[in-house]
Image (spheres, rainbow, N blue to C red):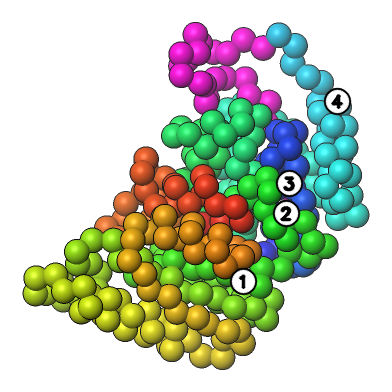
Amino acid sequence: MIAFQRILCPIDFSEGATRALVCAAALARGYEARLTVLHVVPVFADSMEPGFPWRGEVQPMTVAPARADLVEQMRRSIAEAGAGGLQPELVAEEGLTHPAIIQRATSMQADLLVLGTHGRGGINRLLLGSITEKVVRTAPCPVLTVPPAARGADAPQAVFKNILCPVDFAPSSLKALEYALDLGRQADGCVTIFHAVEHRYSEELWDDGDPGPPWDREQVMARARARVHELATRQEQTWCRIEEQVVDGRPYKATLQYAAAHGIDLIVMGAQGRGGVELMLYGSNTHHVVRAAACPVLTVRA
């Protein structure tokens, strides 16, 4: 059973970070978890916009904010997010943003990292090389990314009743399914196991490595449905409703379209695809979903 006991939420005082903090606080209340709020003062240029004159060099800072001023600003953000009653731990550090977040998550043995998808740099914060992307790709624990307009993330306790879990049958997506089902159990909700068939045939549908006969759409779709149904029926005492969905199309597009059309509260995805392909390489399905989803996305490693 999932038991988030230590939640880390980095903030940069942007609107997107505040939204993520609201969600992190709701989860901390729901799981009776310890919440740590982190702000990193970026001393070096670790995520510059294209053409920035100091790319790869030290970024000069005009005036370094005093730690007391930062802590006070963090307290205001926490109050704005309704998290004051949780008495979260406040951490203000100086350094490279991405390594500082990963180091803090590792040292505190965080069970969950909660991030906003739009920081001070606006939507460019999720372009290749951004802080959010780097954290999602390298975090030692599951990462929940929260878009600014996420539905239901600001309830007193974040309960995700309508969960979508795209699977490609890779180990990380199967691990993600475990999280999705457990979250669904705790919310007495519904988990949709979702698979999109993109190519003329999908090697993952043939366990023996033989891609089978020349492409036959009905055969491929039938095989995909059988694999998804196997995943659904092997679960014992799920205590939540499970639905199965197999479609044609590019996985990330199909995932986003389904989520938008069916009022999905949370998408739970694996962090690596088949063959161990790293999450968030440019063009990966998870990369696209995290960038464009209107609801929170939980990424899980195998």
> Residues at badges 1 and 3 in contact (C-beta under 8 Å)?
no
Mark 4 surroundings within 10 Å by alpha-carbon count, few (fewer than 14), some (14 through 19), many (20 or more) = few
Secondary structure of the residue carrying numbered label 4: helix
Q: What secondary structure do most residues of the magenta stretch adopt?
A: loop
Q: Residue at x 48, y 52 (%)?
A: 289
Mark 2 surroundings within 10 Å by alpha-carbon count, few (fewer than 14), some (14 through 19), many (20 or more) = many
- The numbered mark, 1 or 4, whose residue comes first in the sequence reads 4
- What are the residue bounds of the magenta stretch? 35-61
**Please, is residue 40 above or below residue 45 in the view?**
below
Would residue 1 be visible to someone looking at this image? no
Disc 1 marks a residue whose amino acid type is Asn
Disc 3: which residue: 19
Secondary structure of the residue carrying numbered label 1: strand
**Residue 282: x and y, percent?**
37, 40
Residue 69, disc: 4
Q: Quadrant of residue 194?
A: bottom left
Disc 2: which residue: 24
Disc 1: which residue: 162
Q: CA distance from mark 3 to mark 2?
A: 9 Å
Closest to the camera, between mark 3 and mark 4, is 3
Disc 3 marks a residue whose amino acid type is Arg
Disc 2 marks a residue whose amino acid type is Ala
Closest to the camera, between mark 3 and mark 2, is 3
Disc 4 marks a residue whose amino acid type is Asp
Q: Nearer the viewer, residue 135 or 104?
A: 135
